[in-house]
Amino acid sequence: MCAPPRHAEMNIYDLTEQESAWIGVPHTGLLIEALRAIGEGRLSAKCGLKADLPAVRWSGLIRGWIRALELDPRFFIRQFRFIFVEPADYRNWRDQSSLPPSEQKVRRPKGAAVRCAARNYIDTERNESRQTSQKRAWEHIRSRLPGATYRQVMDAMEAEVGKKRPGRPRKTASAES
């Protein structure tokens, strides 16, 4: 049997779960990338269940797990709790990987910036002689302010054009002629 992991080590499942929640990347995708790094030797890991596996067997297991996860993301994902890595090694790997670093978390913009983007959207729609749309407003503002929430956008739209009436807009007799 392997010696129990030191307290400084964490299992790869929990580590990638915390990181994925922090940076907004799907957990399974981050776990696959970490497993690839372990299989390629860029991230050192230890087995927490059985005696140390030979390198050939370890890399074969990793390749099989990656294929299974790519086919079905729900594939016994919790079994990866017996793979332990040093958090410092994991952070070094993350800093060198192509995935976005955790420090570049998208910040929520202030309300004034969202209202300014909403005014910009409204002016654009009016210049094109179109009515405003909540869906288009959300898409327009989200593309310019990635950290904006849906609630912020709807509040800004309500402040600029007033509260939306329920239901679909009706065609009036003057519009039909």
Image (cartoon, rainbow, N blue to C red):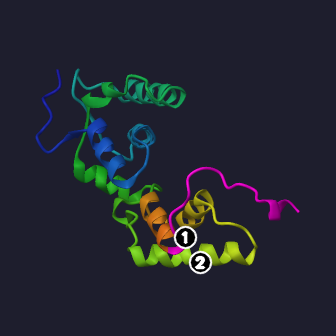
Secondary element at image label 1: helix
Picture quarter containing residue 174?
bottom right
Type of amino acid under label 2: Asn
Residue shown at 50% from the left, 26% from the top: 72
Picture quarter with the N terminus = top left
Q: Read off the residue under disc 1.
A: 144
Q: Which residue is mark 2?
A: 120
Q: Quadrant of the C terminus?
A: bottom right
- Please give the range of residues in magenta: 160-177
**Residue at (34, 45) in percent of width and height:** 43
Instruction: Verify whether residue 130 appears in magenta.
Output: no
Q: Mark 1 touching mark 2, by CB under 8 A?
A: yes
Which residue is located at x 28 percent, y 43 percent? 15
Q: Is residue 52 left or right of residue 95?
A: left
Q: Residue at x 76, y 56 (%)?
A: 171
- Reply above or below: 175 against 17: below
Residue 88, given in percent of the width and then of the height, sits at 23, 53
Circle count:
2
Horizontal side of residue 79 vs 75, given as left or right: left
Q: Earlier along the polypeptide chain: callout 1 or callout 2?
A: 2
Q: Amino acid at mark 1?
A: Arg
Look at the picture and state if 138 lies above or below 161.
Answer: above
Determine if the magenta segment contains residue 170: yes
Q: What SS does tag 2 mark?
A: helix
- Vertically, is 113 above or below 106? below
